[in-house]
Structure formats: C-alpha cells, structure tokens
Image: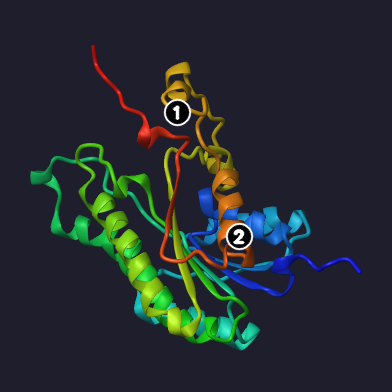
Amino acid sequence: MAKSPYYSSKVILITGGAQGIGRGLAQAFALEHGHVVITDLDWDAGADAMAWLKKQHLAVEFMPCDVSKEQQVQQLMNKIRQQHGHLDVLINNAGIAAPPRKPLAQVTVEEFDQVLSVNLRGPFLCAKYALPLLEKGTNPTILNITSTRAFMSEPDTFGYTAAKGGLESLTHSLAISLAPQRVRVNAIAPGWIETGPWQQEGKKTVPHHSKEDKEQHPVGRVGTPEDIAEAALFLCSDKAGFITGQSLVIDGGMTVKMIYHE
C-alpha cells in the first residue's frame, strides 16, 4: 500500500504567507498535501495568493492578522482551534524591513520599535498562543525565518538586524523551553532571495541579476523561495526529528566567502 504524504493530515500556519518567501512556502506545503493557513496584514495580497493557489487546486485558507497585535494573534489561534482543533506546523515568516536605510541619528524610536514589534514580538506572540494547538498536533514544529542579517550587516539597518538577531536567540530559547511539550523549534536564515515573481499580481517583477550579483554567491546564482521551501519541508518533517534549536543558513555560500579589495 502506498504511504500517504507526510503532510496530508497536517495543518500548517504560515505568517506573512501572501507574498515572497511566504507564498513560496505556502505553495510547497500545499503541494505536499498539507492544509495551509496563510495569514498576512495585506488583504489584497492575501486574496491574490488564495486565487493563485486555488488555481493549482491546493488546500489553502487566508486569515488576515497583524502578528504584532496580541489580540489579533489570539483571535487567529482561536479561529484555527474552532476550524481544525490543532496545529502541526507554525512558520513565523512575517517581517518588515522598513524604514529604508537611515543614519542612526535619523532613525526614530517609533520606526525601530515597529520593526521589532513585527519581526520579533510577532513570532513570540504566535508561539505563545499557538502552543496549546501545537500540543494537540502530530510531531509539532515551529520554524522561524530569520536572516543572514542576524550575523552580518549592511550599514544603517538597525531595527531589522536587531530583530533578526533576537529571533535567532528566541529560536534556541523556545527549543529548550518547549521540549517538554515535544515541540521542535528551528530557524532558517535566508541570504539574498529573489522574490520578484512571488508577489501580488500587480507587484510582480521580472528579476535581472548581473554577472557580479551571481558571482558573489559561490553557487553562482541568487536564491529563490523554492530554496527556502525545500529546506522548510525537511526541517518540519519527521525526517528532522533529531534536529531542534538549530539555524540553517541558506545563502548560496555568500556569508562564508571572504572578499578582499585590491
């Protein structure tokens, strides 16, 4: 008898799932027969993602939510409880990079706090209120999407870098703290991932990468959401059952390449 796909009975919640890496993750888990719930603050992007995924005959739902707001996260988890009764995979992908790069003296406290509230408080709130649902799931896992910015910086990206560094630390803290509830927690730290084709229909762009763009990656190309999704499918499966508290860097080797200026 053929074995059922691993994710066929699983409920997967992907925050920030309407565009970019999140949309790629939603497609990948749905193609593996998981029941995917995507949440996003952008209603239009959510509706667009739903239409795109349903054209592929994939099982998806859209539940709008601002993950930085405690009450909205509570309402989201209550809705999942009412409709599904459990949760097997939580992927904390939602994040913002605003404001654009600014010198330190020009960054407002409000701007700094906004990035931390979405990128760091959001995953904390989602983990907190998803835990009772995960405890009812099968081989429950949390996957945090961080960034190589947690380990290296471009100038003037204070809030984003700080939030992603905090999310790396939150990952191993959750892994140790939730081990008694048998919840595994890991992270993926993407490098340069081209998301232009994975946006809302009216925002899609055709990527163009120069020879220099490609050659700064030892693998010879820029990354794609599929690269992240393939690793996520593994880390959230029972094949990764002995892996927790870890962060997998997926950046085509960029962060280990030394660059000298002659």
Would you say the residues marked 2 and 1 are in contact, meaning their CB atoms lie under 8 Å apart?
A: no
Q: As rendered, which of 41 and 81 lies closer to the eye?
A: 81
Q: Quadrant of residue 111 in the image? A: bottom left
Residue 196 drawn above or below residue 187 = above
Classify 192 as above or below 185.
above
Side (left or right) of 88 relative to 182:
right
Image x and y of residue 236, in percent: 57, 64
**Quadrant of the frame with the N terminus:** bottom right
- Of tags 2 and 1, the one toward the viewer is 1
How crowded pointer 1 is (Cα within 10 Å; few <14, some 14-19, many 20+) is rated as many
Q: Mark 2 belongs to which amino acid?
A: Ala
Residue ID at (43%, 38%): 192
- Whole-percent x and y of residue 256? 36, 34
For the point 29% across and 46% down, the residue is 151
Mark 1 secondary-structure assignment: loop
Residue drawn at the location 58% of the way across and 86% of the way down: 136
Quadrant for the C terminus, please.
top left
Q: Please say which color scheme the image uses.
A: rainbow
Say the numbered circle drawn on residue 47.
Answer: 2
Q: Secondary structure at mark 2?
A: helix
**Position of residue 51 in the picture relative to residue 114 (left or right):** right
Spot occupied by residue 94 in the image (x, y as percentages of width and height): 43, 60
Name the N-terminal-most of marks 2 and 1.
2
**Which residue lies under the disc numbered 1?**
217
* Left or right: 84, with 176 as reference point: right
Q: Residue furthest front?
A: 242
**Residues at marks 2 and 1, CA–CA distance in whole angstroms:** 35 Å
